[in-house]
Amino acid sequence: MTTISAPGTAHDAAGPASPDHYDVAVIGAGPAGTAAAIRAAELGARVVVLESSDRLGGTCVNTGCVPTRVFAKTARLMRDVRAASAYGITTHPEPIDWAATVARVHERVDAVRGIKAEAARFDDAGITLVQEGRARFEDPHTLLLDSGRRLTASTILVCVGGHSRLLPIPGAELATVPEHVLGLPALPRRVAIIGAGNTGVQLATVFSSFGSEVALLDLAPRILMPSDADVAAAVTESFEAQGIVVHTGIEGVSSLAPADDGRIVLTWTAEGDERNDVFDAVVMATGWPADVEDLGLENAGVEVDRSSIPVDRYFRSSVSHIFAVGDANGRDMLVQAAQFEGEAAAENAVLDANRRTPHHLLPAGGFTDPDYAGVGLTEAQARERDPRCIVATASYRELERAVIDDRGVGFLKLIADNRRELILGAHAVGENAVEVIQSVTTAMAAGIDVATLAGVKFAYPTYSAIIGSAARALLRAGATGSPGRE
């Protein structure tokens, strides 16, 4: 077995080997922890995974990405049912059955957990799985579980994920957080969603498609602040056309209070005016701090900054043998980031290596209506770095597949360097936008230049064909010096 110890390293400090001593201890069995544990075991380390929940897979599988995607699928079905008459199909839409929808979400979550089969994968890899409650540091190498069991490890990887944050205002306990939406007893007639980031906008689409009146509120000047500005503008316009009321740039939310009829009074301020609105439910999608409280990190000497663990570029914390991966380090709250970080941190821990994971090619988006996605630099970021960069946009209105499907809202924007050798960023709004951006990400990772991408033959009629259209628009923009449009 490969050992991570060497004279004077963490293994010596942890003491002699014992049945409860491991080369690597991984706290958390979500995407980051699973990837880290399996990679460490592949490298020959003796690995233990400590998971406080009885359900493996982490937030994404159990209460986050997977349930949200099932909701999004349901929302699309509702949209298509309402549009069926345009295709000569007679339907009689009924109100959504909330209980059946929630049951379907739970069933699909269980199906995903079944195919992931983390427990079996751990067993096959020779990894010890311990589910005996929360793990807490007693010292830099010792972990105490709720069960009273103690474990020691030469290297510890903190992969605990994150949790939703309630605003520190009176009545906040009346609100629902996104991972508890499944627990709502009925579909709310009117719902306020506070926070217009990725989670908030997806829930806005879901509730609106289900027939709820939706108000979306945020302190930021626009929704989806990290996204390209044109993406945010297009999604906002589509939301408002669907009847979603978007309030951005508000000055604050001051309180929630119970109404006489059992609903919730939301008090908030905009343009100097205090407003009181009544809703059946209020969802706070207002942050995602790392779940590092009550880990005893102070006993290990690990520094914490604003509810996350600062790390160097190799995922080491302020204590060199303790790593923080995924949501725990507060960098990119994405499954795709967590998995690669987990593998890199495991290699650094077991091999004493210095592997990094570049984060500039992390495609991300949301299953709203319309979808949105992006990868690489936004246009503002690209122009700040290089004012001569080239930007071109292809519209869904000119895309045959979008016309066929009556999904003409949207665009793909490509950003390239002034020589058109590299694609610096790609941003899309529209049907299948996430899949379109994933294809562009593949081209970017392969270093394909714009001319090559423009010459790729895309199947007809497909949504991905818009990539070729945008690439050809980039070539024309570079030749004429004017913004490219197709």
Image (tube, rainbow, N blue to C red):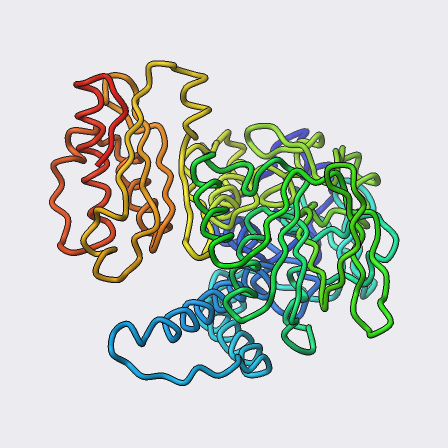
Q: How many marks?
A: 0
> 480 above or below 102?
above
Residue at the spot 20% in from the left edge and 55% down from the top edge:
462
> 471 above or below 286?
above
Q: Position of residue 242 (x, y in %)?
A: 48, 59
Q: Quadrant of the C terminus?
A: top left
Q: Position of residue 371 (x, y in %)?
A: 41, 53
Residue at the spot 18% in from the left edge and 53% down from the top edge:
400
Q: Position of residue 288 (x, y in %)?
A: 67, 47
Q: Residue furthest top?
A: 387
Quadrant hosting residue 184: bottom right
Q: Note whether residue 46 is visible.
A: no
Identify which residue, 143 or 406, lies in the foreground.
406
Identify which residue, 75 or 158, lies in the foreground.
75
Residue at the spot 63% in from the left edge and 74% down from the top edge:
187
> 244 above or below 351?
below
Classify residue 403 as left or right of residue 114: left
Residue at the spot 56% in from the left edge and 42% down from the top edge:
223
Quadrant hosting residue 443: top left
Quadrant hosting residue 283: bottom right
